[in-house]
Image (cartoon, rainbow, N blue to C red):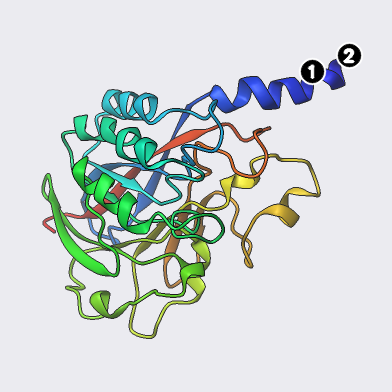
């Protein structure tokens, strides 16, 4: 009887949860004082495939209660969505009165699934979301300054790091990249301080000894913070589902990142 409850829980209960986890990431480079930037990271909403996934409206309302300084969305917005769904689904993000940055994920650009690239980007921009694909922008918040850059999805094969090779290195460089494997395929001369990603779903269904075999990464990325020496990578497990309409032992999650930046930058 108890075993029969596990699929029920994974199909009908856990996908509707929405947790919030807080993590501190130090980019202050040993400064005596640091300016904390409160950032939200979400990814892998996969709106359109499964009707019981956490809605964008609920995600946006939760973000409003968190009151961040900036929001980052690391791709895979949709899968199997109609044009009407794409136009309407992401409007709730327009309520957020802070900067919102996003990149597209592999399912957004047809690897696999339909290519929503142009339609999706227009819908995101209509909701006030910046999409810095293969380019960089300066972000000033509180007393902090940083450079936010984004790259196309790794599987799409159109990543161009030219825009971030010559950025001002006196400010922390944050790179939005849907697939965390981007961290080990950086062009020479590109050295982001922090890479923000999704893609892995944290396994989505975490069965011991099998979970690593199903995570779509060629490297030991799962979820959480990784220090690679030359950069740090934070991977969020996301809020949606793909392939199987279940989550188990990895509930949908919004990550709140307290990013410590050098004082005066």
| Residues packed near mark 1 inside 10 Å, few (<14), some (14 to 19) or many (20 plus) | few
The number of callouts visible is: 2
Q: Residue placed at 60% from the left, 52% from the top?
A: 222
Residue 242 versus residue 30 in the image, above or below: above
Q: Residue placed at 46% from the left, 37% from the top?
A: 47
Residue 1, position as x, y percentages in the image: 88, 14
Q: Which mark is residue 1?
A: 2
Decide: marks 1, 2 in contact (CB < 8 A)? yes
Q: Residue placed at 35% from the left, 37% from the top?
A: 84
Residue 262, position as x, y percentages in the image: 21, 57
Residue 202 versus residue 212 in the image, above or below: above
Q: Residue placed at 44% from the left, 60% from the top?
A: 109
Residue 165, position as x, y percentages in the image: 26, 80
Residue to which mark 1 is pinned: 5
Mark-to-mark CA distance, 1 and 2: 7 Å
Residue closest to the far bottom: 188
**Displayed quadrant of residue 104:** bottom left
| Residues packed near mark 2 inside 10 Å, few (<14), some (14 to 19) or many (20 plus) | few
Residue 21, position as x, y percentages in the image: 46, 34
Quadrant in which the C terminus appears: bottom left
**Displayed quadrant of residue 2:** top right
Task: State left or right for residue 233 relative to residue 52.
Answer: left
Residue closest to the far right: 1
Task: State left or right for residue 138 relative to residue 44.
Answer: left
Residue 54 versus residue 73 in the image, above or below: above
Q: Which mark is residue 37?
A: none
């Amino acid at each position: 009887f108890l075993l029969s409850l596990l699929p029920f829980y994974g199909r009908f209960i856990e996908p509707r949860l929405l947790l919030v986890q807080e993590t501190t990431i130090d980019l202050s480079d040993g400064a005596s004082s640091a300016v904390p930037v409160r950032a939200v990271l979400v990814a892998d909403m996969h709106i359109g495939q499964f009707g019981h996934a956490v809605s964008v409206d609920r995600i946006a309302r939760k973000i409003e209660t968190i009151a961040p300084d900036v929001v980052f969305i690391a791709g895979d917005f949709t899968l199997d969505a109609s044009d009407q769904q794409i136009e309407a689904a992401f409007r709730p993000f327009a309520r957020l009165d802070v900067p919102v940055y996003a990149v597209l994920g592999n399912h957004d650009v047809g690897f696999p699934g339909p290519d929503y690239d142009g339609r999706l980007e227009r819908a995101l921009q209509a909701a006030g979301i910046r999409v810095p694909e293969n380019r960089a922008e300066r972000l000033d918040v509180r007393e902090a300054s940083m450079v936010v850059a984004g790259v196309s999805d790794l599987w799409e094969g159109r990543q161009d790091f030219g825009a971030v090779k010559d950025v001002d290195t006196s400010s922390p460089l944050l790179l939005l990249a849907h697939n965390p494997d981007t961290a080990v395929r950086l062009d020479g001369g590109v050295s982001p301080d922090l890479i923000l990603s999704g893609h892995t779903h944290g396994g989505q269904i975490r069965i011991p000894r099998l979970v690593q075999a199903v995570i779509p990464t060629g490297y030991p990325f799962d979820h959480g913070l990784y220090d690679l020496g030359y950069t740090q990578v934070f991977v969020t497990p996301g809020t949606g589902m793909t392939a199987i309409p279940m989550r188990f032992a990895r509930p949908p999650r919004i990550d709140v990142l307290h990013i410590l930046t050098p004082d005066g930058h």
